[in-house]
Amino acid sequence: MTSNLGISAGSLHALSKILSNAGIQRIMLDENFRSSGNQIKRLLKKSGVSLDQKCTLGEMIEYAHAHLLKNYRHEYLYKAALLNDYILKNHSLVDSILLNEFRVGQSKADAVLVNGTNKVFEIKTELDNPGRLASQINDYYKAFSEVFLIVHHTHYEKYLSLIDEGVGLMLFNDNSIEIARPAVPDNSNLDTITMMKALRKNEFLVVVKALSGELPNVKPILLFKSCLEILRQFAPDEVQAEFLSVIKGRINLFVSDVVTSAKLPESLKLSLYYSNINRNEYISLVKRLDYQF
């Protein structure tokens, strides 16, 4: 692969849409993957990359990922580095789960790690602004104990002045993640209502039964309110323990094993992890990654 200076901003943006979680899942699971492959090839050329020879779909995805790392560092690249360079190196996916775009209060956490501890990761790329950062962090502490901000290493000083000392800071640099400052665990702002609203209906019922031993016998329209009245009898950190336990119940061991052990392009692993792909779909994916363009 070679590149030149004729980089099109529009082509970079379009390429970033394909190399996003939704875009890569379409490549992995849709029958029309050849169209996406041809589009990647065309956009690479438009954005200054010339492919020296025929290459596979997997190779083109890696070329596109590397090109975007140099020229258009969008959120998916930060998340992929978080998984590949931090999560997989420091945690086991057998007993850990990484959540994507997890709703907490009025905010959506870019990523949440739940295992023996619990961590929220808020990403601010070079393409973002810090406008809502304070309110986002406040929301995250209502359900989780540790909050990390991930920024490009050149923005370290800018964001250091915008966050409290207890918020951890991680730096994204050349496809790697470095902890510049650890987070200080803080459970003082945990909020039972926020935690329960973040769960699916069947999950918050599991929390209530685990803590109280039974579910309220009320009409469906009154169920959530009645459950909250029961949970108010328990300390927020007790509720959080069950909240985290039920989230860990979402772990997909097959996908975790594939992401950990399979020889796949690192740029694909994040989207594969979030796909809940089954064995047959995985076999099909391996074949299509070898398809030549």
Image: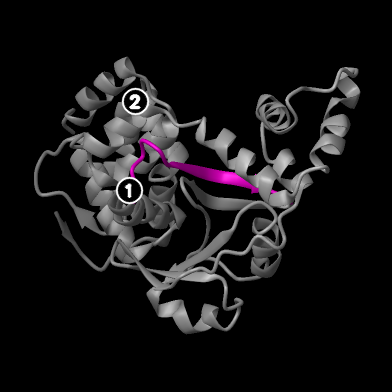
Point out the residue furthest to the left here.
53
Give the alpha-carbon distance from disc 1 to disc 2, as whole Å. 34 Å
* Frontmost residue, 46 versus 57: 57
Q: Which mark is residue 254?
A: 2
- Where is residue 29, by image quadrant? top left
Question: Callout 2, which amino acid?
Answer: Phe
Q: Which residue is mark 1?
A: 43
Quarter the N terminus occupies: bottom left
Tell me which residue sits at (41%, 61%) in the image. 9
The question of residue 268 being in magenta is answered with no
Q: Is residue 28 visible?
A: no
- Vertical placement of residue 3 versus 111, above or below: below
Compare residues 105 and 142 and report the one nearer the observer.
Answer: 142
Q: Residue at x 64, y 67 (%)?
A: 133
Question: Residue 66 at x, y = what percent?
Answer: 26, 56
Looking at the rendered structure, the number of numbered marks drawn on it comes to 2
Asked if residue 37 shows in the view, the reply is yes
* Residue 214, placed above or below residue 56: above
Report the side of 138 relative to 288 (left or right).
right
Magenta span: 91-105
Residue drawn at (30%, 46%) of the image:
267
The residue lying toward the viewer, choosing from 230 and 48, is 230
Q: Position of residue 206 (x, y in %)?
A: 67, 27
Q: Percent x, y for residue 140?
A: 64, 57
Callout 2 crowding tier (Cα within 10 Å): few <14, some 14–19, many ≥20? some
Which element is circle 2 on?
helix
Q: Is residue 279 left or right of residue 120?
A: left
Image depth: mark 1 or mark 2 in front: 2
Q: Quadrant of residue 41?
A: top left
Amino acid under label 1? Leu
- Find residue 233 and report its horizontal and vertical position in percent: 82, 42
The residue sitting at the top extreme is: 280
